[in-house]
């Protein structure tokens, strides 16, 4: 009897393909070459089955078997399968998305082991010779190697790449390959944990098997120290730890801190890596050579040979949700994986998501709280500046400017936060009222003064700034409103002699520029930082004592049901950048709505009070996390086809336990030249929705208009765009 293999291919089709097994057996989870259409493709064996629904005589045989051992197996393969079903995404794309690009081919796996160095004979002589004097870094390097080989990354962390190269060129050290986890270099000790930190760490350490914890600690309360403590315990048990962070490129400090403090190799996995680096880190994790893996969203799919712990830092961050293609949520997957692996998972945040707080209330997660800042730091004081009747200087009120002036006069630093890059969000003609709009999205174009361009932040359209009004020929073109570029200009001219540093996507293009800019941030001396969301995350800026949130009103009046939660998180996170060292911090919130109830709750009771209130509102309105959503988004150049498709989709959703709202205009009804609309599915429970979706989506794929549009399904959408 022949064996039949079900093979997943990287194609956007909701099906797997059956082949006959050849002479070489292929394990489930390994790569194989299979004939597909007119050519051969690389696939991954998804299952071995007893019988095919197709005529078995006509099944084609597998071509070559690429891997002798599976690339994806056990828990990871099972979780990937689950995720493909749960998020309704083709299995082939899900499996191929989980392996590094280089391995999505016939490429054989590279040799195991990691690049390392050992002391050579010359180095031993150099160490032993009392008369020789070396640079301190070289001494440190040789002394470390006297205890055995060390990985290249460890040596770089210890003594710098220059010392390593110099020792190599003198023949004092030699390259070797290390297999298995490298010896630890000890790591540098941190502050003694305070009682709250100790209790939190002890609770996780005591868990051993699966347990979900929400580490709910105010900014600067020492959550990272708790992570380091539980990771140390995990390493002591010879297990690997997987740590997810929202962003690595912007916070190189985090990676450095983990490497130095733990004294082991920390494999980084993020989108800024080259393909080679990515493949090496992935394999090091899979082979158990990397004791700690620190990565962004997609690192949740890394295989771990000896899993022991998963940490998700800033768990509320929306970057954990993939916004296109396979729309998974890495935080949610982390909990699913931890359960399957039977290891603890720790979700940390100063501003936990309402989902996680609801899970605590339902006793699914255990809450660990750090209510005070660690060390000497005090919580920042929040202050509202009422913008009504104030004369504004490009968006900044007089009391705000006074506060900035006295802060820089004291030699301290200010962060001016505005979540909009560019010079001004609108360019308008004072004579006739014409304004610059994107021809493809019908949204205002943002003015970028530095290079005299008008740009659409939604689709990438851009053009030169016209010198005269295209409608009336007048010359009175005015920039309305302000983005970070304009704030930078205003602050530079107002505070002459004080360095003003702007951090947004425009000033951080390119790795070198970005790293240099970010490295310069924590330095001492009076300085004004102007930035977007980028500066709200994780940076430790010890000399920062004043934070100005230029506009909070956009968030107060948004139609998105998550807007208030986001605004609260954003304010608290930006505020958390202030006063992290001994000097206390102040946060100014500029608003036209000083009496808005949400601001009142936030000011009086902090994020916790706001979150409790928002949870109650969500419960009353049956919104997530008290209801389950799936969003069908569609766009088309053919408006009628779009309408017909979504009307049929809504009708097809007539089913007990499911409510379909639609067709609804998308929050951006036009983008990049296409009309956009959507249908929102709602259900009181997850299993009803999950049971309903596959059949519904099959029905949609059979609709006649299906080929005239682009559409997607988003299970547990985090925004309704
Ligand atoms: P979080 O991750 O909660 O924002 P961190 O772990 O980065 O906080 O800690 C904030 C600051 O407080 C850091 O500078 C850290 O070194 C310091 N810190 C943390 N725990 C302690 C402690 N137990 N004693 C003294 N300082 C501490
Ligand atoms: Zn005009
Ligand atoms: Zn556009």
Image (tube, rainbow, N blue to C red):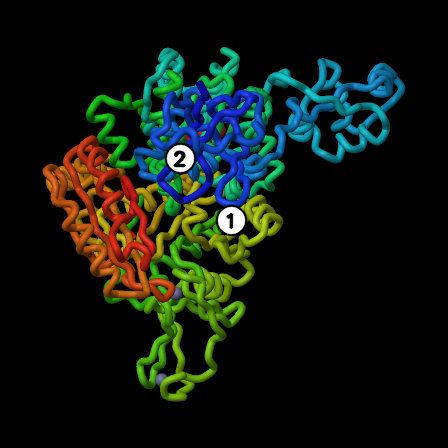
Residue 718 in the image, given as x and y percentages of width and height:
29, 44
User: Where is 635 relative to 108, above or below?
Assistant: below
x, y percent for residue 709? 32, 58
**465 up-or-down from 641: above or below:** below
Left or right of 587, for residue 447: right
Which quarter holds ligand 2?
A: bottom left
User: Which quadrant does the N terminus fall into?
Assistant: top left
Q: Are marks 2 and 1 in contact (CB under 8 Å)?
A: no
Residue 357 location, quadrant: top left
Q: Looking at the image, which residue sits at the far front?
A: 57
Q: Quadrant of residue 257?
A: top right
In the picture of the structure, the residue carrying the numbered disc 2 is 16
Quadrant housing residue 76: top left
Q: Position of residue 286 (x, y in %)?
A: 53, 24
In this rendering, the count of numbered labels is: 2
223 and 28: which one is in front? Answer: 28
Which one is closest to the eye, mark 2 or mark 1?
2
* Image point (27%, 40%), residue name: 716
Determine the secondary structure under disc 1.
loop
Q: Earlier in the sequence, mark 2 or mark 1?
A: 2
> Mark 2 to mark 1: distance in Å?
64 Å
Comparing 18 with 103, the one in front is 18
Q: Position of residue 606 (x, y in %)?
A: 26, 38
Q: Residue at x 39, y 77 (%)?
A: 478
Q: Is residue 661 above or below residue 641?
A: above
SS of the residue under disc 2: loop
Residue ID at (65%, 18%): 179
How dense is the environment of label 1, judged by Cα within 10 Å: few (below 14), some, or many (20 and up)?
Answer: some
Near-viewer residue (106 or 226): 106
For the question of whether residue 71 can be seen, the reply is yes
Residue 184 in view, yes or no:
no
- Numbered circle sitting on residue 411: 1
């Amino acid at each position: 009897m022949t064996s039949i293999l079900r093979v997943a291919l990287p194609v956007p089709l909701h099906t797997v393909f059956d082949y006959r097994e050849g002479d070489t057996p292929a394990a489930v989870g390994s790569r194989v070459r299979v004939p597909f259409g007119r050519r051969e493709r690389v696939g991954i064996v998804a299952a071995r089955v007893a019988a095919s629904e197709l005529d078995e005589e006509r099944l084609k045989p597998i071509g070559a078997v690429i891997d002798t051992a599976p690339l994806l197996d056990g828990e990871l393969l099972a979780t990937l399968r689950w995720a493909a079903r749960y998020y309704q995404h083709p299995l082939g794309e899900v499996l191929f998305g989980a392996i590094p690009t280089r391995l999505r081919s016939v490429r054989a796996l590279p040799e195991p082991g990691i690049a390392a160095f050992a002391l050579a004979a010359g180095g031993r002589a150099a160490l032993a010779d009392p008369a020789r004097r070396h640079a301190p870094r070289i001494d440190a390097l040789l002394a470390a190697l006297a205890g055995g080989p060390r990985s290249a990354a460890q040596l770089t962390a210890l003594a710098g790449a220059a010392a390593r190269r110099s020792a190599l060129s003198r023949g004092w050290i030699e390259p070797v390959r290390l297999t298995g986890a490298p010896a630890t270099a000890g790591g540098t000790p941190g502050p003694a944990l305070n009682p709250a930190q100790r209790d939190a760490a002890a609770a996780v350490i005591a868990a051993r098997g699966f347990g979900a914890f929400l580490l709910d600690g105010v900014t600067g309360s020492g959550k990272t120290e708790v992570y380091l403590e539980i990771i140390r315990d995990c390493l002591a048990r010879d297990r690997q730890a997987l740590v997810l962070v929202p962003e690595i490129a912007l916070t190189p400090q985090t990676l450095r801190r983990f490497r130095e403090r733990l004294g082991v190799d920390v494999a980084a996995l993020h989108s800024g890596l080259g393909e080679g680096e990515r493949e090496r880190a992935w394999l090091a994790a899979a082979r158990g050579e990397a004791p700690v893996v620190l990565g962004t969203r997609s690192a949740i799919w890394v295989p771990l040979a000896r899993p022991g712990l998963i940490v998700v830092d800033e768990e509320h961050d929306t970057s954990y949700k993939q916004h296109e293609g396979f729309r998974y949520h890495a935080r949610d997957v982390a909990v699913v994986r931890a359960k399957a692996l039977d290891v603890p998972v720790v979700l940390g945040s100063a501003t936990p998501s309402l989902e996680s707080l609801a899970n605590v209330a339902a006793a699914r997660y255990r809450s660990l709280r750090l209510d005070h800042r660690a060390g000497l730091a005090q919580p920042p004081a929040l202050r509202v500046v009422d913008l009504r009747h104030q004369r504004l200087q490009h968006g900044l009120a007089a009391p705000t400017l006074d506060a900035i002036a006295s802060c820089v006069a004291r030699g301290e630093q200010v962060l001016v936060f505005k979540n909009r890059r560019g010079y001004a969000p609108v360019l308008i003609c004072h004579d006739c009222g014409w304004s610059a709009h994107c021809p493809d999205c019908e949204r205002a174009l943002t003015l970028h003064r530095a290079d005299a361009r008008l740009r659409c932040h939604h689709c990438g359209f851009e053009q030169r700034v016209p010198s005269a009004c295209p409608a009336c020929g007048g010359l009175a073109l005015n920039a309305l409103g302000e983005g970070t570029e304009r704030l930078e200009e205003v602050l530079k001219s107002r505070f002459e002699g004080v360095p003003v540093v702007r951090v947004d996507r425009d000033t951080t293009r390119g790795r070198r520029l970005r790293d240099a800019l970010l490295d310069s941030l924590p330095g001492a001396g009076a300085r004004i930082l102007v930035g977007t969301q980028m500066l709200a995350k994780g940076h430790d800026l010890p000399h920062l004592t004043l934070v100005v949130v230029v506009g909070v009103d956009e968030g107060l009046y948004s139609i998105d049901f998550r807007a208030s939660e986001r605004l609260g998180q954003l304010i608290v996170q930006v505020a958390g950048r202030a006063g992290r060292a001994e000097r206390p911090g102040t946060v100014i919130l500029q608003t036209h709505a000083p009496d808005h109830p949400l601001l009142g709750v936030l000011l009086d009771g902090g994020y916790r009070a706001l979150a409790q209130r928002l949870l109650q509102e969500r419960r009353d309105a049956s919104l997530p996390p008290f209801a389950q959503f799936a969003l069908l988004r569609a766009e088309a150049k053919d408006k009628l086809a779009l309408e017909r498709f979504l009307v049929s989709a809504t009708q097809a959703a007539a089913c007990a336990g499911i409510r379909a709202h639609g067709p609804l205009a998308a929050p951006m009804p036009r983008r990049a030249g296409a009309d956009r609309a959507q249908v929102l599915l709602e259900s009181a429970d997850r299993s009803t929705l999950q049971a309903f979706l596959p059949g519904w989506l099959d029905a949609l794929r059979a609709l006649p208009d299906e080929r005239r549009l682009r559409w997607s399904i988003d299970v547990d959408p985090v925004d309704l765009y």
